[in-house]
């Protein structure tokens, strides 16, 4: 790769798009070529994201029909998609074809759900809609960087935010063989996980000082977690998932309950996770319980464990917009371009947010 690779962000006016803009701005190798948003086309980035106004003082959003004009022929491109579920696949397929026509070497990382299933039928069974580009599914893989050594395709579908936290907590336990392959997961997410468009569940009077479950045992992330846990661990895993809406903007905390085949100690389980993530720069096994404020605005995941005889609990905390979306996507893009996995992502959490 060259020292500087142009980066294009599709769907750049949403929360994940805004985080991708923030991360690209600080990246040593990626340089923003186009922030793509039909609704924001022509507007300064700082108008939609005031916290980025000084960083992108002269940069405006561009329409989907215009972004390719900002990328030269015969070069390289890091293409991030933060477009919505169900819409991203067709947009990405068109972008890949356009890059082929211009002889552009492109890698894509998609933050939507459109490339999280290798099988079209599996995707359509969960999302109840036709897949937008089934002919390019074989060009994508879906996994967490921590759970695979190498991939043989050019593009990645990043797991969802709840799935990211859950998988980081579940996979080492499944790999260890200490437990039966069945887990019960309770997760709490911040309001940014519902996207930028206002909804009843994210309206401040409803969300503030409130906590409630939604879609218990019926959330669409459960089959995603089950499929990816099996792919990473080699064990078919039954996943029972209850998500909750929390009264905060950013962060996810998941608690995984499982039964072990024989009594285990905290030390036994901590060693499983310490060994599993010994070479994972963004995963830290902590003493006590992980806390959202210690990871928000960073790409870190903190994991804690507790045991009581044959009962084990694993807790994981991440920032849903960073490690669960934009940061995880950047982590993958670094790997696809042969860069250090930590490039542009080694910022600490600010604390006390």
Image (cartoon, rainbow, N blue to C red):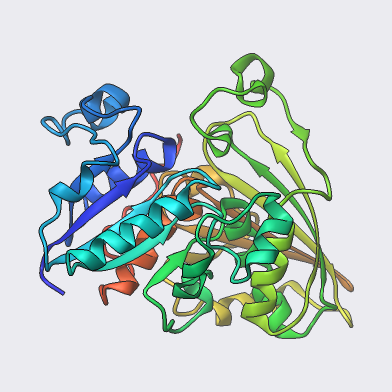
Residue at figure coordinates x 71%, y 76% from the top left: 173
Is residue 179 in view from this perspective?
yes
Residue 255 percent location from the top left of the image:
73, 55
Residue 222 percent location from the top left of the image:
73, 58
Residue at figure coordinates x 19%, y 67% from the top left: 104
Is residue 346 in view from this perspective?
no
Q: Is residue 346 left or right of residue 7?
A: right
Viewport quadrant of the N terminus? bottom left
Viewport quadrant of the C terminus? top left
Residue 192 percent location from the top left of the image:
53, 35
Q: Is residue 213 left or right of residue 100?
A: right
Above/below status of 140 relative to 207: below
Residue at figure coordinates x 82%, y 44% from the top left: 216
Above/below status of 154 relative to 201: below
Residue at figure coordinates x 66%, y 81% from the top left: 233
Above/below status of 233 relative to 48: below
């Amino acid at each position: 790769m060259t020292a500087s690779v142009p980066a294009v962000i599709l769907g750049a006016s949403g929360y994940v798009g805004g985080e991708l803009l923030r991360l690209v701005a600080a990246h040593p190798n990626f340089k923003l070529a186009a922030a793509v948003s039909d609704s924001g086309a022509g507007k300064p980035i700082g108008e939609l994201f005031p916290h980025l106004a000084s960083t992108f003082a002269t940069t405006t959003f561009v329409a989907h029909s215009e972004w390719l004009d900002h990328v030269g022929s015969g070069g390289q491109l890091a293409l991030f998609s933060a477009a919505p579920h169900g819409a991203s696949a067709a947009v990405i397929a068109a972008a890949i074809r356009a890059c082929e026509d211009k002889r552009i070497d492109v890698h894509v990382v998609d933050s939507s759900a459109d490339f999280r299933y290798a099988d079209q039928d599996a995707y359509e069974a969960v999302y109840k809609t036709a897949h937008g580009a089934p002919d390019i599914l074989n060009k994508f893989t879906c996994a967490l960087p921590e759970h695979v050594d190498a991939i043989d395709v050019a593009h990645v579908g990043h797991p969802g935010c709840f799935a990211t936290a859950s998988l980081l907590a579940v996979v080492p336990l499944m790999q260890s063989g200490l437990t039966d392959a069945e887990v019960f997961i309770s997760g709490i997410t911040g309001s940014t996980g519902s996207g930028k468009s206002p909804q009843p569940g994210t309206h401040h009077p409803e969300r503030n000082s409130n906590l409630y479950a939604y879609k218990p045992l019926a959330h669409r992330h459960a089959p995603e977690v089950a499929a990816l846990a099996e792919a990473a661990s080699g064990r078919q895993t039954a996943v029972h998932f209850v998500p909750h809406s929390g009264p905060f903007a950013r962060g996810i905390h998941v608690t995984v309950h499982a039964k072990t085949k024989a009594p285990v100690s905290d030390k036994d389980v901590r060693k499983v996770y310490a060994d599993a993530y010994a070479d994972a720069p963004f995963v830290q096994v902590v003493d006590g319980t992980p806390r959202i404020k210690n990871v928000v605005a960073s790409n870190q995941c903190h994991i804690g464990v507790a045991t009581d005889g044959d009962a084990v609990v694993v807790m994981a905390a991440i920032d849903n917009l960073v490690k669960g979306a934009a940061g995880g996507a950047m982590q993958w893009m670094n790997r696809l371009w042969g860069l250090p996995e930590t490039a542009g992502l080694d910022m600490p959490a600010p604390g006390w947010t």
